[in-house]
Amino acid sequence: MPKVALVGRPNVGKSTLFNRLLRSHKAITDPTPGVTRDPIEVEWQLGGKPCLLVDTGGYKTEGNALDHQVTARSIAKAEEANLILLVLDITELTPEDEEFIRLLRPQAGKLIVVLNKADTVEREILAGEFYSLGFSDFVCISAAHNRKVDELEELMESRLVFHDGVVHPPVPDIRLAILGKPNAGKSTLLNRLTGQELALVSPEAGTTRDPVEGRFEYKGSMFRVLDTAGIRRKGKVHENVEYYSVNRAFKTIEESDVVLLVIDAVEGLTDQEKKIAYQIVKEGRGVILALNKWDLLPKVKNQLEAYTDRVRFLFPVLDFAPVIPISAHLGTGIPELLATTLKINRQLHQRIETPKLNDMLKIWMDDMPTNQIKGVVYKIRYLTQVSTLPLKFVAFGNHGKDTPGSLTEYIVNRIRKDLGFPDVPIELEVKGGRE
């Protein structure tokens, strides 16, 4: 697929244009300079033809070490792209713009200058100042007001080469989301899984803002993985940018098949991970507790068993979830992590036929020590599976929604044990009827 990269200094409107072209709010937009840090790469249809659209962090001539990393990533994405959209603010040409343009000169043959914030015809007159830059293609647009964006798309389509051939229906990717608190090692894990430096890794908390996407293959299965912003307690979130980043992180749960909940094994468990866990179970997604930085713990006998027991005690809602020690930095535990992901994904998409379910239900009801609670007889007469991902079963009993939790938990546990769903969340709803 041809690749299109949006580049420019901070606050010229790259992310606004990125969202406008995608017709979706994939990138966070905010007046704060330098919101976008990691490149965001999304598959996109341009004139009905597939290509990749990449939003990059803003180019800066000055700044700290993190700013320099962002700048280096932006230049690298421009070099590897088939088409570059150099986004400039039509109201001003700054020395920072001129320095960035100097660096992009070797890529001039694949570059379009996009003069953004041309909200009116009168503003287009300002374009004359930019013609001396010497590039062949200029387009005046307003990404915020969707002005002349269609003209830009037509020019982009004319400049790209699309490969013809037989298109096979894609095999669905296994969708992974990486969640956890800031500095738990999520971005390091993303880079380890994909074998690429996709996400910036920095000791500065909150480096990742937009979800960073990558793809990789493991044992014949394709994975799509999203690294997300670190999730802190609401009381510690003060910036609008972080607020949107955290909301976007939670949104990725419902867009995933399996969530890798990364826990800093050195720091230990917190209430914040509990809140994330409850949200994962609520959405019915698979979850693995990845105990990262395991290599930094002192070697103690039965340490994993003790840690797992503590996890089960603090996370009763995740009593089914696998607990796997890893080191994203060293790569230890990664094969087990991925093998477990494949196993969970199979369980999430498994469907049991209704006749088999009800044959098993009869056995389960016969196996119950007693179906009486405080003198009341409770019976489950019929069971059916209504969905996968999330896994949901509906049972019909003589007391409907008043069926006690102990009986529903018994049925769920037997479904897990006898039908091959040991590692995934299961929802069971009990209704009345079906005599």
Image (spheres, rainbow, N blue to C red):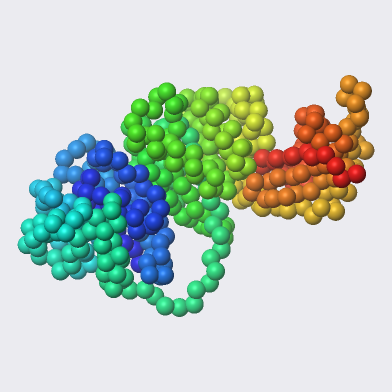
Give 378 or 265, whichever is nearer the viewer.
378
Q: Residue at x 19, y 38 (%)?
A: 63
323 in relation to 300, above or below: below
Q: Nearer the viewer, residue 266 or 44?
A: 44
Q: Is 82 left or right of 364, judged from the image as shown? A: left
Q: Is residue 292 visible?
A: no
Q: Say if 125 sits above or below 38 in the image.
A: below
Which quarter of the figure has residue 417? top right
Q: Quadrant of residue 425?
A: top right
Task: Determine the residue positioned at 56% across, 53% down.
Answer: 174
Along the viewing direction, whichever of 340 and 111 lies nearer the viewer: 111
| Residue 164 placement, left or right of 336 | left
Q: How many marks?
A: 0
Q: Residue sitting at 15 percent across and 44 percent down?
A: 61
Q: Position of residue 5 (x, y in %)?
A: 29, 58
Asked where in the image residue 183 lies, by quadrant, the reply is top left
Q: Looking at the figure, which quarter contains the C terminus? A: top right
Whether residue 162 sits left or right of residue 99 in the image: it is right
Q: Is residue 384 above or below residue 326?
A: below
Residue ranking furthest to the bottom: 165
Residue 167, percent from left and from top: 50, 73
Measured as percent of width and height from the top left, residue 118 is found at 19, 55
Residue at 41% across, 65% down: 45
Which residue is farthest top? Answer: 374
Q: Is residue 319 visible?
A: yes
Q: Quadrant of the N terminus?
A: bottom left
